[in-house]
Amino acid sequence: MLTQNIPNLLQLFLEHTPASVAIFDREMRYIATSRSWLRDYGDHESNLLGSIDSCDCSVLANVFLEWKTIHDHCLMGEIEKCEAQKIAKLDGTVGWCKWECHPWYDTNGEVGGTFFFTENITDQKHIEAQLKLYEEQLEELVAKRTHELQVAIAQLQAEIIECKIAEEERQKLISLIENTSDFIAIANLEGKISFINEAGKKLLGLDHLNKLENTHICDFHTPENWAYLQQEVLPTVMETGRWHGELSFRHIQTEVSIPIEYNIFTIKDQKTGQPIALVTISRDITDRKKTEEERQHFVSLVENSSDFIAMATLDGKGWYINQAGLQLVGFRDTEEFLQTTISDYHTDEDNKYIQEVAVPTIMSKGCWQGELSFRHFRTGELIPIEYNIFVLKDQKTGQPTNLATVTRDIRERKQAEEALRQSETKYRELARREQLVNVLASQIRESLDLDQVLETAIVEIRDLLQIERCSFSWFKPDSEPPVWETLKEAKEENFPSLLGCHPADKIGPVTQMFVNQEILKIDDVTQFHEPIHKSFLERLGIKSEIVLPIKTRSGQIGVIVCGHWTETRPWTQDEVELLQAVIDQLAIAINQAELYAQSQQAVMTATQQAQQIENTLTELKRAQTQLVQSEKMSSLGQLVAGVAHEINNPVNFIYGNLSYASQYTDDLLNLLKLYQQEYLQPTDKIQAKIDAIDLDFIVADLPKILSSMKIGSDRIRDIVQSLRTFSRLDEAEMKKVDIHEGIESTLMILQHRLKPKQNEPAIEIIRNYTNLPKVVCYAGQLNQVFMNLLTNAIDALEEGIEKGKNSTPMIKIATEILDNNRIIIRIADNGMGIKPEVQQRLFDPFFTTKPVGVGTGLGLSISYQIVVDRHGGELHCHSQLGEGTEFAIEIPMSQLGNT
């Protein structure tokens, strides 16, 4: 950025400006000097910085006291000038300077010090002295010559010689004029130009073709200066003999305006003292003007910057600050700033950090950047800033000379960051509230333990709302007297417990509000008007309270109570909505618990002979998840057993009569054959009937029909046997069964899904059975497991067939005896496989990947419970995407206590 290079540009300006410039403060202490100043008036830079009392006063010699007086005048707003002043230099020589002293103003419009601009005119003075000397010499020669002519013609030769000498001197003067770099011209009193030196011609763009006859002084100036020349400059010269100031020349060829420092004076007649000619010695100040413009641009940039920009000495003493900096820290004017050091702007903690971290970094690397705080000098406010501080170095020696800073107010950015943090906090709070509701909902799905749900609810509510106490109570209207029983509470350790029963009449008429499902919200108990409940709260020391009622399906009334002891606490609408959401979840939990209790009682009644009193709460919870599926499978078993029984009777009747039918048929056919042999020529009527019924076909086909009927009845008997085997679902006792028989009966029932369908191949069953002994188990329940696993395998294969990813579907069923008196049944398919994330939840109750209405999510869960809990076995799933899935059922061959 340009602002970061401004101090260097100012240094460059002071280093290279041809003018001698010095900047003083109000006490005439040096602030800065140009290199030309040092060359003209001193020999060490350090002598010209700081207090004027500490510098070498001999540098200024006899003019010091006069300049001090001039400085004081300028502090009053005046401008002082001197066209020529003699100065004694340190080397003993005497020089001449032309100077101007101007006041400079700070940002508040007050005079902050002075600028001294000087020009070394020693050479010009020497030329003027030479000119004057030559004029005097010329006049003396002329006078002498006239005198000598009058005295004697004999002295003419001597006078001629003397004229030659004078001519030589004049040529020397002309040579001096021609070789100076300044513009020098001579004109008559009317302003007509008679002579311009080579430097002047070059400045104006004149060449040998340009004639000077009838050329006026005004012709070399820009038009805007003509009136000023005619009305101010030339009259002043004629009156006072001299005029000095800044004007502009016009380049003859390019018409470009050339700023000049214009000196014009008269040459007087030696005898009469009357002006006889005008002489101007002018200097091109284009470079000086450009430098001044650049400096002014730099100052404008700094002063108009919105950032805090300041400079200080290496020991931290401030000497420059822009307007934005004054406003940021509350300074009224620059004078207040000049009385401060860097440490005044910071807290003790920041100053320690600056000394220990920032300063070493600045001195080693030249700069440091970070975030600190400024102290407002009026209000004491700490202003967060982005701090950028760096050193300014001497361009010749490379040594640090000053410190500078470009600092930015970042309050708005910090406020935005704080707003963002608050927003994040708000959303985190909303997320926590959502999480609380989700936790309760999850526990309701996974647990039927109402105590656990209530405990979690009140602990989470208290933690989330940052309150001192949260509790849950039931209303007992049938007690004598009616009471509120507080069952759960979460509180600060130093507060008393309110667990137990509290008479309803001590609580007050607010009980009716809770019965009516109305919310009670008390931000400040002192402002609550119902006297009984107010007295109850004050006696306990509670200052704020909110109560949300809950009503169960059975009509029972409960409340969530949130209280605060140490101070009043207003309850926001968001908190009320959160508590209402919790109440809704608790209502679901309580209703579910009641439903569970009812189902538990129904199960205990229905299976009173099969269940023992010592069944654990875990078994009861598991019974809830199995209830629907078990009832369905039990009904299916009863239906299948009934169907098998009803089919079995007529099938046995048919099967039992088929043998007689076959025997009778054979007898009839033999008799018919005998008739044909004995009566070779039947009657016409009999022959017509034989032809009509196609007797030969009947004789050939009737045995085939009886044979197929026998095969069909055998098939029906096999199906009935399979149905009767599978229908053992409601058998409660363990018994020894043939595992293979159970598998085959299940396959028989699923045969319709294994057969080929339109555009779909059949599902091949590959059996790899080991010679298993009979296994002691719950046969019906294992059949249910086989049914669930085979059904899932068929579903997976059909999905692969539909998606065109399986043209040879197959199910492999293998059995094996393990070394530890256990058997394993493997059921594997070559379907699409199961995703890893799904495998982790396969045995979760109600988890299913099937569409709504297709799967209940209980099949594998119940299978897992049957194998693991009922048979002390293991059920594992091994699946690879794209390759298939295998379920392994491992159970002992005999159960403890059953052989």
Image: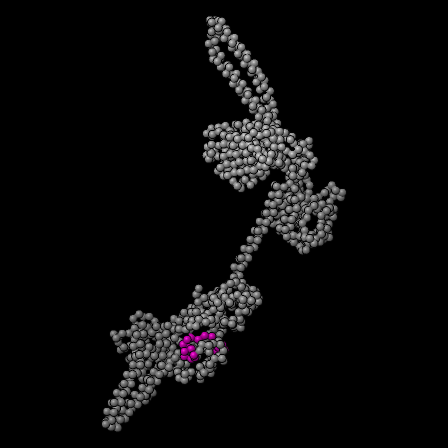
Q: How is the image coloured?
A: one colour
Q: Nearer the viewer, residue 490 or 755?
A: 755
Hey, which quadrant is residue 568 in on the image? bottom right
Judge whether residue 187 can be spotted in this image.
no
Name the side, left or right, on which 216 lies relative to 295.
left
Residue 136 percent coordinates (x, y): 32, 88
Farthest front residue? 819
In the rendered image, the vertical position of residue 64 relative to residue 835, given as above or below: below
Q: Nearer the viewer, residue 86 or 839?
A: 839
In the rendered image, the vertical position of residue 564 relative to residue 748, given as above or below: below
In magenta stretch: residue 796: no
Farthest bottom residue? 151
Name the side, left or right, on which 30 lies relative to 121.
right
Question: Which residue appears at 33% of the width and 77% of the height?
Answer: 181
Residue 654 percent coordinates (x, y): 57, 17
In magenta stretch: residue 39: yes
Q: Quadrant of the C terminus?
A: top right
Judge whether residue 660 can be spotted in this image.
yes
Span of residues in magenta: 26-43
Question: Which residue appears at 53% of the width and 20% of the height?
Answer: 712
Question: Which residue appears at 68% of the width and 51% of the height?
Answer: 491
Residue 103 percent coordinates (x, y): 46, 76
Residue 114 percent coordinates (x, y): 46, 76
Q: Nearer the viewer, residue 856 or 101?
A: 856
